[in-house]
Image: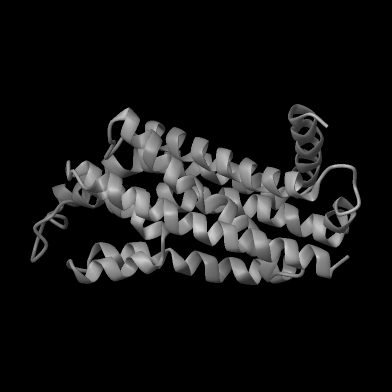
Amino acid sequence: MQLFQLVRIFGRNDVKLISRDHFLVIMFGFVLLIALVLRFGLPWLNGYLADRGILPGGNVLRSLEDFYPLILAFMVVFQGPLIAGAIFGFSLLDEKDDRTIQAMLVAPVPFGRYVAYRVAVPTVISFVIVVLEMWLIGQALVSAWQLVLIAAGASLTGPIAALFYAVAAENKVQGFAIAKFVGLAGWVILIGWFIAEPWQWLCGLFPPFLISKAYWMALQANAWWPAVLLLGIVLQSLMLVWLVRQFQRVAYQGA
């Protein structure tokens, strides 16, 4: 079966699964809402706090604008792909409930191609989300080619999250419980911003932090940002390979 036909068939099924779940549709809308709120809300809030002597003010000498890289790293570079991963992760849980995954084991389509599709789609969607949100927000922007590379690194968070839901949860109820834990993981990025180097690098044990770190370094014109980005990509790729193997094991166990 040709690749285009596979994408069309699986894609049609994804559209059906997502469209029948209002929560997943709202999550797609939430991505746009985040971008619009940050685009118009950040400049307004920055001016509001500055006019009232809050930021900067008192013992805080930095304006809210100085924290834009932190806010965008968390809300766009991390949360954008995480939302995409959650959407497709819950779709996988629907397929788990419908035993579609087990049916794929005996389908004419090689199971490896199905898994490749499940990795590729959230990766592409995550990449598009990061790039479009960054351009729409228009704050703390790196150059276009840097953004493409950073978005490529961040996009791996999407399939990691999707497969994590599929491996760790038996159904959507458990998926919602796991979502709380997954969201808390992003606090590593928020906390890491305030930790001085070299201790900050310990946050790199959570690989998505390294993508955010590379973004911050690119904004500072630090020549080592590509190396940090590459390290983050390598570590996330290893996580992804492990999750793919776990997903395959779960699929065969459920057959």
Q: Residue drawn 26% across and 62% down?
A: 193
> 45 and 199: which one is in front?
199
Relative to 74, 111 lies left or right: right
Q: Identify the image quadrant of residue 226.
A: top left
> 171 and 168: which one is in front?
168
x%, y% of residue 55? 16, 55
Q: Residue drawn 32% across and 35% down?
A: 146
Relative to 244, 99 lies left or right: right
> 247 and 177: which one is in front?
247
Relative to 174, 111 lies left or right: right
If the image is split into quadrants, where does the N terminus sit?
top right
Q: How many marks?
A: 0
Relative to 59, 84 lies left or right: right
Q: Is residue 191 visible?
A: yes
Q: Is residue 45 visible?
A: no
Q: Residue drawn 80% across and 35% down?
A: 12
x%, y% of residue 197? 17, 66
Q: Is residue 212 above or below residue 31?
A: below
x%, y% of residue 123? 56, 43
Q: Residue drawn 74% across and 66% down?
A: 249
If the image is split into quadrants, where does the C terminus sit?
bottom right
x%, y% of residue 211? 36, 52
Q: Identify the image quadrant of residue 97.
A: bottom right
- Which colour scheme appears in the figure? one colour
